[in-house]
Amino acid sequence: MALISLCQMDTLYISSHPDDFRSLLPLIAAEFCPSPPQIVHEDPPAEVARSRPALVLAGSGGTVLTGANAVSWYLAAAGNRTGSDKKQESQVWQWLSFAENELMPVACAQSSKAELLRVLKALDETLVLRTFLVGEGVTLADIAVAVAALLPFKYPADRKSLVNATRWYNTCVNQPQFLKVLGKISLSTAASEAATPDGTPANGPPKTEAQLKKEAKKREKMEKFQQKKEMEEKKKMQPQTEKKELDVITYNIPTPPGEKKDVLSPLPDSYSPQYVEAAWYSWWEKQGFFKPEYGRKNVSEPNPRGVFMMCIPPPNVTGSLHLGHALTNAIQDCLTRWHRMRGETTLWNPGCDHAGIATQVVVEKKLMREQKMTRHDLGRGNFIQEVWKWKNEKGDRIYHQLKKLGSSLDWDRACFTMDDKLSYAVQEAFIRMHEEGVIYRSKRLVNWSCTLNSAISDIEVDKKELAGRTLLPVPGYKEKVEFGVLVSFSYRVEGSDEEVVVATTRIETMLGDTAVAVHPNDSRYQHLKGKMVVHPFCDRKMPIVFDDFVDMNFGTGAVKITPAHDHNDYEVGERHKLPFINILDENGLLINVPPPFLGMKRFEARKAVLQALKDLGQFKEVKDNPMVVPVCSRSKDIVEPLLKPQWYVDCREMGKQAADVVRNGELKIIPDHHLKTWFNWMDNIRDWCISRQLWWGHRIPAYFVTVNDPSVKPGEDVDGHYWVSGRSEEEAREKAAKRFNVTADKISLRQDEDVLDTWFSSGIFPFSIFGWPTESEDLRVFYPGTLLETGHDILFFWVARMVMMGLKLTGKLPFKEVYLHAVVRDAHGRKMSKSLGNVIDPLDVITGISLEGLHAQLTDSNLDPLEIEKARQGQKSDYPSGIPECGTDALRFALCAYTSQGRDINLDVNRILGYRHFCNKLWNAVKFAMRTLGEGFVPWKKAQLCGSESVSDRWILSRLSAAVALCDSGFQAYDFPAITTAIYNFWLYELCDVYLVMNSHIYQADICRQTLYTCLEVGLRLLSPLMPFVTEELFQRLPRRLAQDSTSSICVTPYPETSEFCWHSEDIDRQMEFVMSVVKTIRSLRADYNLTKTRADCYLQCIDSDTAALVQTYSLQIQTLSYSQAIYPVVGGDSTIPQGCAVAIASDKCTVHLMLKGLIDLEKEVTKLTAKKGELEKQMEKMKEKMAKNDYKEKVPVKVQEADAEKLRQNETELQKVNEAIENFRKMI
């Protein structure tokens, strides 16, 4: 949709009523708009518009939009909140209509509580599997429906049955845009607190005495009502508590690790994750199910099904599982299990990264805490021994957590990037690339952490955005340091009184300035060509250079140049051959500067330089300046650009190759919207700094050469000619002797102290794990791999480097496809942050944790007291009762259900709990079905149609086949929500809610039992990759089709395929869709007339004989599902149907007539409705009299008039319904 830009200030005329739907809707929509309009709380001028809301568009010739929906759509569309495509836009419009025409009328009508609950339940059902109404983020649909639901949710209501809607509502109203308009909204269980103690509405006119008396009576009634509700709640509490305790069932049968779990004992009464997840994993592992050799002689044995290989993104050895890991592993394990069940030779290879900086920091802190020693006190060799000791004690923790998630990794092939095998591969990769000239030595700017004394990679630099002046804590400084200001000062032009004013956010760096730059076309400075400016603190004369990079419209158009401490200035310095003066040492102390600044700490020098400029009269001004401050993610230090001699990888040619393989289709990146990022990086790639000033890691196998021969001049560190690489010192010495044409005894070597960037070893991980460069069976079979699955946030840092290094060192791509999943956020769409208290350990979701337990984790963290308190409040808000035990299967299923390609995942723990309830439904369904099958049941050797199936059997087998097809296409396309939806719908809405119910009385028929068995067995196999534990537990209890399969696991049984389950019938599906519309209509009528236990005869008036024949065919199913006494298909007019029926239209082909005569007291119902009619007529008459008064329109506020008109409309609608009901009942008498 093309939209007029809101770059100019639009004006929104709006009502100030706090609960006015028509005002709140555009107000909240405006908050999502990039340029919100000016808000005016008064009527627009008569010539502009006659009603509110009205939006006057600036710069469009006075265009005016009126009406809440039109205005809101315009504002929401400007903020991309109306759907991502035409389909979603249509859905948003439908929800707008729902909010205005269905929800708003019943929300405002106090007398229609049942109707309100019906509408809210429809909303609740929609939200069972969704966080938002349309798409994966807040849209105008959510805004409209949430605003329409304000009254029901703000004021007392019974919301126990609206779990999903309540969760969604909480998510919406806690979005920042909602909070700004509505303020903090609590779900009240008491009377509204929107009024002051005397009954005066907040921000409203005083109420009359009559109004106050009326409200006092209302409050008294409400208090009595609340007391009654509280008593009812107390009665309900006790049995519910007991039931909850019963749900925690443990597996207590002694089972040695690796032995098969007992499956002969009866299944517990209800599903319990602790019971279900016990003992299975160690049995799977011991049986070798996760190994590619399972079921074959060796991995080289030809497999017509093919090979699937994927390596895990190696987690840091210091790491602890978080929800990002859980998402990665849920997706990867689902894919691995699916490929394994398809019969492919399947390997998912585990591994762990040595995590250079992170591990070194952890061990250094441990040394200081326990021994009061630094690594320098120990020395390099002893310190590395301490790291290995820590790794061997603590480093396997994350492997245990991965097992808890059910990850089907081949643990015998687990690798650690510092293992001898992988270390040798790293050394070989460096030497080959160095000898080829791809790795070279250079002195350039790097990201330097003064606290760590090391260069760090871009991914380890957090970008902290500041709006203006901000004081930040910096390690090593007692007081906070000022950032976010722009300091202006002047340089005097040599030989004149003229000065040039420049500005900087890092005033201390002016000590390293070597030039001032201006734009070549800037007329203000043309007369200064060839001139110099003088540094105020030393005798340095600095040229005024002319360079295109300067923005002459910013500030004075003159820029100070510090080539040794700024990335842009570095390039200017290179172009103009300026001196590079390094003013910082590795600890952040000033060097190469005059006294009194020499030896100062960098941020203390900041204050000193500023004062010195003031003393000289060259300081001009300081003002707020929005900026981004680079912060080291490890040490929280401010990152400094620092000139250091380092090793670099020349990425130009490798980057071109990496781009080309994607362009020509050799490598596929999914989803494809990441292609733009890929090409942008690869086409503009810079050389990669791979040196790290650490001790823990792969020490660089490069040696600086000193030749003890006067004929060879001494070399400099930055000169690559004086560096050789070697697999040993002897090899390096021989290379050096040959290069300098001297004997080996004249060569002295000094190995580089630095280690390689961790991403270097990660870049060769897909082939180093198989022993490269040594030929091996695994390398031959499993390289190149099939798939790389990871988060899109490391597309460049890891994925691109694997592609480049794989092509460079092996000549092959490391994998054929890359699938990038989304980033996990919390239920409110916020990034996971320890300080927000929303970082959740997946194990806490699996096993459950109290609020106190969550608080205790914060106490054990490194957060400061203020952040801890903020995080505690966040936890208290999101998890007031802690996190319930959800289990591994529910967590995995939820993560996969959330995984829309390329979108962030707003993870709501309540949704995960919903999938635990799904597990319980599954559990009970299988238990019920197994009792139905009976002990002596023997399934057919093959799932097949015999031709004698009932219509119910044919329908459920059609739905099963459809689920198989959807799962197959979903896995092929990495469409995990499609897979979870297909399986969930089949089990819950088709098998449990329909098939098991409508066939509950005929299961003695063998064909019916065979159909039921097929549904159970195939349904569990479909679900197994996503929920491995509960499906294994239930599958082991089912009889087998073939006796020899009695010991196998579900994880190695074939995954259902469309070639076998090809019974999908669109005709049968359409017929059953019609049947269910009839059933739902009958159920709705029964609910309307409160026929909870009474069966009634039902006459189905059909439009033609074909429809009547269809009703006759499915009459038993309709009767069972609708709880009817009997079903009578009728063709013809109303004369063929007995008097005394309630009527409702099921479809264009069928009308339902439900016999009520004799089942309810008709006279009593008519009396009640007549009284209601009188009450409504009285209210309407009073309202009409009020509105008919001469001064009504002048004296009554517009918002009150609008409310009166709405109330009258609602009463008219209700009166019409009452009259129809009275007439209908009188016909029956």
Image: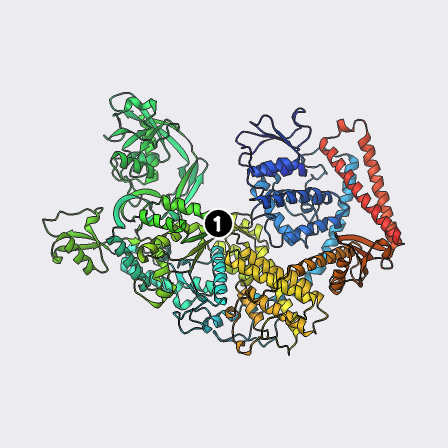
Seen at 72% across and 38% down, the residue is 198
The residue tagged with tag 1: helix, strand or loop? loop
From this view, report whether residue 804 is shown above or below residue 148: below
Whole-percent x and y of residue 832?
49, 50
Q: Inspect this view and state whether residue 850 appears.
A: no
**Residue 527 visible in image:** yes
Residue 850, how many percent across, how many down? 56, 58
| Extreme-left residue of the structure | 710
Q: Is residue 227 above or below residue 210?
A: below
**Residue at the spot of label 1:** 833
Residue that lies at the very extreme toward the front in this rendered image? 1105
Rendering quarter of residue 183: top right
Q: At which x and y percent is residue 808?
A: 31, 54
Q: Amino acid at mark 1?
A: Ser
Give left or right: position of 826 versus 1124.
left
Residue in the foreground of this view, choosing between 883 and 525: 525
